[in-house]
Image (cartoon, rainbow, N blue to C red):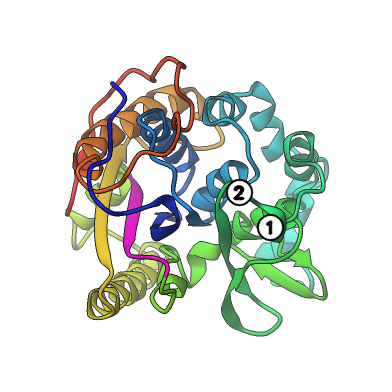
Amino acid sequence: MSRLWWKRNYTPDQVALCLNSSFFGFFAHSGFLHSLTMSGFTPGHISGASAGALVAGLYASGLDTGRICALLRDPRIASVFRERGSMWRLFRTLIGREGATGALAGHQGRALLRDYLGERRIEECSRARLAISVANLSRVESELLRHGKIVDAVLASCAVPGMFAAQAVGADLYWDGGVADPVPFEHWLEDRRVRLIVIHLALNTAELQSRAAPHRFGFYGGLARSHQIISDEIYRLKSELARRAGKRLLVYRTITPRPGPHLLNLGPRCQQMGARTATRAAHELGAMVRLTAAGGDHGRKNIAPGRSRKQL
């Protein structure tokens, strides 16, 4: 992608980027963000839920976007999903034992993230103001974390129910940010600095196929659809509130195969597809956002484009 000169009157501090909750969607998100920053796009605000929180946290901490992409392709990622005692914890979770909330404690993920993030804190991020969506089980409410250690917040937001045990942050226990706020941008509606909100939705073909088969599901599929109904309605209402608040929303979708713990080999392909979405997005954003300095990662090779889809 060639470097673009943003033409209108948005500055980075007026631009926010939101990365949604998606099962292993961090591949698509990282490809999207890397390719977009190659064009000089530098959001002053960034938020994320679950997979989106992982990429948002790494970016806000100051990590080079090319390095973020490489990190997520690191073979050590597979070790995050292999923990001694996980089958016993899963059994206790399935029979409803008190205190048993997931198969994986998250120790491997914490160790890996600390290698890159150390003890960095959310409020210390200077590259972009960071907010991470989480579900606070102790207080029974959705929450946006804007203070505390990035590692703790990201792990809490990525704690998929059943797969990971609830994660402790301070005195409270948290689950995946996608439980209640999978597309976290409502906090910008009253922020007078933010005028443009860019949303990247990482989706996978399994989700779309499920929607295309309205009568083919069982009990667990029905629960998943019920959650999706709630999420879609909240997203619709927030979008309407954003427009009423005078915010401009640009929504981009990347549709990929469904990666997972045993399909990490799909990661590079999903990153390529996210990059293709960013290529399309950059042309539109280039007409609005003023380029700052030399851009995010100028001089690095772009990820090869793949198939994607955009929704405005």
**Depth check: 128 or 151 in front?**
128
**Which of the 4 quarters of the picture holds residue 149?**
bottom right
Q: Which residues are magenta?
A: 193-203
Does the segment drawn in magenta span residue 84?
no
Residue 62: numbered disc: none
Q: Tell me what residue is drawn at x 52 percent, y 48 percent.
A: 51
Q: Amino acid at mark 1?
A: Ile
Residue 122: numbered disc: 1
For the residue labelled by badge 1, is the local secondary structure a helix, a strand or a loop?
helix
Q: Tell me what residue is drawn at x 81 percent, y 70 percent.
A: 170
Q: From this viewpoint, is residue 62 visible?
A: yes
For the residue labelled by badge 2, is the local secondary structure a helix, a strand or a loop?
helix
**Depth check: 95 or 148 in front?**
148
Residue 57: numbered disc: 2
Query: Mark 2 Cα within 10 Å, few/some/many (few <14, many 20+)?
Result: many
Query: Does 204 appear above or below 173?
Result: above
Q: Residue 144 in the image: x percent, y percent?
A: 58, 70
Alpha carbon distance from label 2 to label 1: 8 Å
Q: Amino acid at mark 2?
A: Gly
Instruction: Tell which circle, 2 or 1, labels the residue nearer the N-terminal end.
Output: 2
Asked if the residues shown at circle 2 and circle 1 are in contact, with their CB atoms under 8 angstroms apart, the answer is: yes
Q: Residue 258 in the image: x percent, y percent?
A: 38, 38
Q: Of helix, strand and loop, which mostly describes the magenta segment?
A: strand
